[in-house]
Image (cartoon, helix red, strand yellow):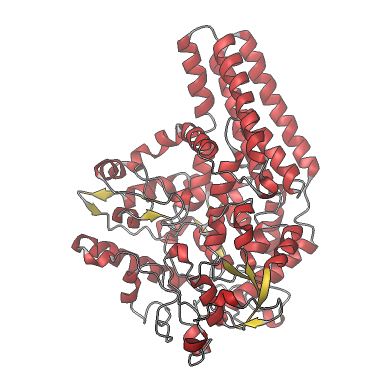
Amino acid sequence: MEKATSRPPRKDTVLSRRYIEGLIADGKHVIIFEGRVLKVDAFLKFHPGGEKPIKHMVGRDATDEINALHSKEARERMLSFQIGRIQEPWINFLPVIQGGKFRVYTEETCSSEEDLPSQDTSSQEGSLPPSPIFDAIDSKSVTRRKRPSLGTDSSASTPPNEESHPKFGFLDARTRDEIALDTSKYPSLDFSCQENIKQKYRALNQRMLDEGMFDCNYWAYFVECCRYTLFAVLAYTFLRMGWWGTSAFWLGCVWHQLVFTAHDAGHMGITHNFHFDTVIGIIIADFIGGLSLGWWKRSHNVHHIVTNEPEHDPDIQHIPFFGISHRFFNSLRSTYYDREMTFDIPSQFLLKVQHYTYYPIMMLARFNLTRLSWEYLLKGQAPRKGPAWWHVYLEFVGQAFFWYWYGYVVLYKTIPDWSSRLLFLLVSHVIPSPLHVQITLSHFAMSTADLGIHESFPQKMLRTTMDVDCAPWLDFFHGGLQFQAIHHLYPRMPRHNLRQAQKYILRILSRNRDSVRYIHVLRRQQGGHQPTRRRRQTAPHHGRVSKVDCGGGRLFPSSLITACFESSHVTHNACWTCGRVS
């Protein structure tokens, strides 16, 4: 038997789908980028963003994800891993990390098999999310794909069947209802429609680039620095005066505001240079804030790839305290933490009252970030190879510096008694808590349904993310997090350009009001209630799940401004999302 790895092809050789499947079956990490086949095993340990984002893209067309999250220089370096080209059109596989299974490639077996399914079959294949419960979805209400016709299942997962236990029958029905709701609101998942979405998104991305939307406004950062300095001076002044609580308040304001710039730096949205922006982020996060930028980047990169997926997105995996999806009641296994999120007795109790504990827990969330930061640093989760190898050592220096000035100089040497020290510690850590509400607001009330591996990147981002409406003068307080939908489409766009980008997008709104929604904007007077309402409606009651609908826009139909827009690049006013022609 000759395995796929025994005959390395040239870079321009067209590789069959069956051959690529064999590579993945042999344990290779193969992704598709702009029609090229990249085998990135040699780079896996060197990837500054960690291994998990790559693993979630194995066997998939990662063109939009790569372009959105990487600089031009990084994308050019990736081409050194090219081993061939794909046969068009490419139909995504379900990655191994999500439960996909692949067949070993042999010359004997493949000579009698079709390498690529027909257009009709492949356009309907593989949208099945990683759970067999989706097989029962009514095909009349939900667009779903047929199972592969090539024999062994190469793109479907086989986790434990949730239907095997009678108590999960209602959960399965709830899952089907949420998928049906999403598929009724968004474009069809067939290949041609999703491909059309991708092309319109890429055209818009290029237009944004040409308009200078990715150029940083350094004057805006000068204003930000003036604000940070003012808050820091106030914190120091009141500390010298002995007003411990007031000083801690202003220090908390400094931390709250600085996190936004650290977020920009983590996305290379300031200088667009990997090392410069990383150093800026480490100075802010580690030296000044006592948190690990590396931990945040490792988690956040995965979040941008698998947004709002209960099994995969660490930003919504908060068992036992919060469960924003009924699927957490089935003890899901986290692919990020590599452990089971057990729905045990403490979880059952805490989730019943999560709509009451939401804000109190948010007030103390910074302590958990400190724990996660040290777990990341001490367990060796940071990159030890590649361009980011030295960042972890700078982070250790930053942590030592932080605990020297904050823990020793301020808390121990300056503040005289333990009660005042505790007051300073609590106030300084509680004041930045609006940040955690801002982060969760944009995702917790949105869909967690898995529509499958063939949903396009832009549609998935818009389906799982919302923007929050606020006055322009409040932009400094939200730090760009109010434009999460725009940010998820263009992660590397500087935050001071996000409002302008939103206006630019709204100027080309489609006149087809019956078209699919593009963006959700939640009115600010109701925004704070949505995460708690979602908590209340997913909280289990007496061992069961509340049957109140928690599916996306139905939570707040009167508070949403929904819109879709057209691309002026396409004649006849073709809709950006579904290709409808007016």
Q: Using residue 79 as the reference point, say whether residue 167 is left or right of it.
A: left
Question: Residue 55 placed where, x, y %?
Answer: 53, 61
In the foreground, 97 or 449 = 97
Could you tell me if residue 390 is visible in this image? Answer: yes
Image height of 500 relative to 575, above or below: above
Quadrant hosting residue 395? top right
- Quarter that holds the C terminus: bottom right
- Residue 380: image location, x then y, percent: 54, 41
Relative height, residue 551 to residue 128 (above, below): above
User: In this view, which residue lies farthest toward the bottom?
Assistant: 112
Picture quadrant where residue 508 is located: bottom right
Name the spot of residue 479 as percent of width and height, x first: 63, 42
Q: Is residue 162 left or right of residue 391?
A: left
As drawn, 582 above or below 54: below
**In percent of the image, x 60 and y 74: which residue is there?**
197
Q: Residue at x 42, y 87 (%)?
A: 149
Name the side, left or right, on which 155 lies relative to 245: left
Q: Position of residue 68 (x, y in %)?
A: 66, 60
- Compared across the picture, whether 217 is left or right of 45 comes to right
The answer to whether any part of residue 34 appears in the image is no
